[in-house]
Structures are given as C-alpha cells and as structure tokens.
Amino acid sequence: MYQLLKPIHGGLGVLIQEIETHIKNTGLEAVKNLKGDNIPGQFVESILEVHGKYTELIKVVFHADQQFVGALDKACAAAINYKQNPRHGCKSPELLSRYCDNLLKKSSKGISENELDDKLANCITVFKYLDDKDVFQRFYSKMLTKPSMDAEEAMINKLKQACGYEFTNKLHRMFTDMNISTGLNNDFSDFLKKQNVSELGVNFSISVLQAGAWPIGQSNLPTFAIPQELEKSVRMFETFYSGKFSGRKLTWLHSFCNGELKFNHLKRPYFVSMGTFHMAILLLFNSSDSLKLSDIMEHTKLSEAELKKQLQTLTETKIVVLEDDASLDSALTLNLNYNNKRTKFKITSASQKETPQEIEQTHNAVDEDRKMYLQAAIVRIMKARKILKHTMLIQEVISQARARFSPNIPMIKKCIEALIDKQYLERTSNSTDEYSYVA
C-alpha cells in the first residue's frame, strides 16, 4: 500500500492516520492495567517495547518516512500522557522517576556500565514524550540519593541535554551537596583528631543540604530526642560546623536519617539498617526486655501518633511484640525468639514510605512552581512587547512553557489576573482583551 499510495498527492494521509491510531491503541493497551509490585518497571518497559517495535516497522516498511515517524511520536505521546481520570494528573512522570531511581540504586549490583547507559538513554526516550516534565523533576529530586553517584551524574547530564541547564539546575545543586558532604565528613574526621577525640562511639557520617535546593519541608518536623549514643557525635559536629561556617544554621532532619544496629540478643547476630526513630526505640531495650509505650514516649519525645506509626513497622517485622490494645500503658516486648534467613537486612522507615498525602503535596508543589514560572514568563514577554492582545499573550506563554510542561489556559488566565492585582500589568483603556506592561 505504501508503495502504491506514495506517488499519489495526499495519498498517504489515511494510511498515516490509521498507523497512528493503531500504535496509540497498542501503547494504551500496554500501560492501562499495570498490576503488581514493579509498576514503574512494567510501565517503562512496555512503552519501550511498543516504541522499539514500531520504530523498526517504520524503518523497514515505510523506509523511515518522516510522516510516519511523526505519527509514531504523536501516538507514543498520547499513550504516555494518557490520564485515566481527567481530574487527576498523569501518573507517567511519577512512574518514570521511580523507575530511574530504582535503576540508579541498583546500578552497582550486577549491571555493566554500558548496560546502565543504554537503560538511562531509554529513560530519556520516554522522558522526551512527557508533557509534564516538571512533575518528573519534582519526584526525581525527592528521590535523589547517595547510591551510585556516577550513575546519578550521568542521568542528570542526559536530562540537561534533553531540557537545558535551567531544568536541571536544582538537581545539579543537590548533586553538588552530596559531593561537598563527602569533603565535610573528611574535614570532620581531621577536626576530631585535632581535638584529641579518638572515638565517638559510633561510625558517623552526615549530609549537609541547602534548604533551597532540596524538596524537603522544614515545617511540622516531629519532636524527637536523639538517643544518648548519638549525642556526642551530633554535639561535636555542630561545634565543628559552626566553627567552619559562621552564621549558618543547621536543622536536623532526623526522620530522613538511617543507622545500622547489631542485634546481639538472639541465637546469631544480625546487622539491621533502619531509620533513626526505629533505632532510638530499639536502643532502649539495651537495659530492659519490655517497656511501656508511655516510657518510650518519654525517652524519645515522639508524639503518640508518630510513635504508633513507627511501632507498626517494627511489630510487622516481629522484632518486637506489642499488646493488642496499643494504649500508652501497653507493653512493648523484645522478641527473643526472632529469626530471619538473612543476617543483614533493612527495615523501611514509616516516614520514608510515601503516603498518598505526600504524593498529593508533591503535585500541589508542582502547581505552585508552575504559577511562579508562568508569572515570570508573562512578565518577560510583556516587558519585551509592552502591549499585547490576550490571545497572543496566551500563545507566547504556551510556547515558552512547552519544553517544561503543558500549561492549561485557566491557569494562565489566573496568573494574568494575579499580575494585574500586583500592578505588573494593566488592561489598556481602548480594549478589554489587550494588556500593557506597567514599567
């Protein structure tokens, strides 16, 4: 059909449309009903399978005709940006960011450098089709962590090539913080030697993060009293840091910290990684096999709600046993018959599991960022043009924002109204749909 229709003027139109519809439906079918534990992996791999299959088909059957390549791009974009519920945002940016994060965390485990590079390049293939690239950025920055720093840098550089420096600016600052923290830990070790402090009692390392670069809220931090075993380390680091940087303030984010405990009370020793809150609770059992919740609250200073949230994970792992009613008079008892096939394992902190509310907060934060971005774009455009019709302003704003996200017109209108209220713009006297820049 391709060979027959190609010479005819406009003859390929219906064939191109049919191919686009077919690829779109195949893509939607592949990503609509994903189930199981690894939904991010299934999503990315399903999309890449569809994309790879039809890229090859277009190359062989249609001789890489640009009209069919365009149809493939439109179909993939439609499948990737599909919203199951129009009221809610598209899940694809979040799924892709989780896939990238899982990939980078596992990169040190049996994946060759070339294989990892290919997988990262495949991620960028999917990323380029995303309408809401800023949602991806927000979720990815929340997950940016220390493991495999070389791989993280490779990913950020690929994003920079796809979207430019402005898009990856905060990710670069986060990455820089992690590298600077390595140097700070070395300087801290030197400081301890000069102070003749031979032993802190624990292996201690710290990450110092810029408040403006990391998507970590500093409000509503849980109250917490650090375990006695960590007090010396924390105090010494604060002394070191205030001496090195005068005027800077450290805010401790204990809910993001991790520690490793060695269990010596069982038939064989276990090395267990866990959050600081879990560690604080379990360290209390050094002096007793059973404790009341009220006593644990008194020692840790955690709120009742936060304590019960942390205990839920500990009781699920069966490391400790809690009386049924879980009141403050209930006893929490160490399970002296605990057994695990692995001698080294991790307890996922309750505060590290993202709740639906936190996911919602991430989306709300994206909306706030979008409003600021749109207002800045409107001011830039109006400053250059001085006077502009409403429809022309809307079109220029959409054009500028397209590389980052697809702005909806009601949001742009709200931003225009906000700027009129702030007296950056005003409606011209001779027309209701024309604006002028207020110098």
Image (cartoon, rainbow, N blue to C red):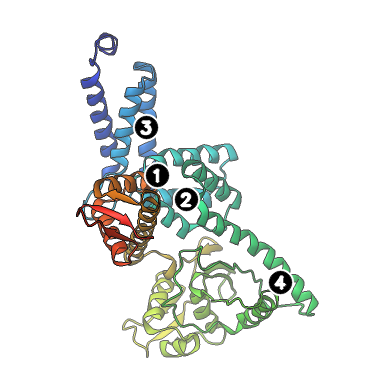
Instruction: Please identify, in this view, whether the residue under mark 1 or under mark 4 is nearer the observer.
Output: 1
Label 1 crowd (10 A; few <14 / some 14-19 / many >=20): some
Residue 384 in sight in this render: yes
> CA separation, marks 2 and 1?
9 Å
Observer-nearest of 382 and 174: 382
The numbered disc on residue 188 is: 4
- Where, quadrant-wise, is the N terminus in this rendering? top left
Among the 4 quarters of the image, the one containing residue 197: bottom right
Q: Which residue is mark 2?
A: 167
Question: Which SS class for mark 3?
Answer: helix
- Which residue lies under the disc numbered 1? 403
In the image: residue 438, left or right of residue 85: right
Identify the mark nearer the N-term, 4 or 2: 2
Seen from the viewer's position, the closer of residues 100 and 62 is 62
Mark 3 sits on what residue?
51
For this view, does 319 lie left or right of residue 396? right
| Residues marked 2 and 1 touching at CB (< 8 Å) | yes
Label 3 Cα neighbours within 10 Å, binned few <14 / some 14-19 / many ≥20: many
- Measuring from the top left, give residue 113's x and y in whole percent: 59, 40
Q: Give me the C-alpha separation between circle 2 and circle 3.
A: 25 Å
| Callout 2 secondary element | helix
The three-letter code of the residue at mark 3 reads: His
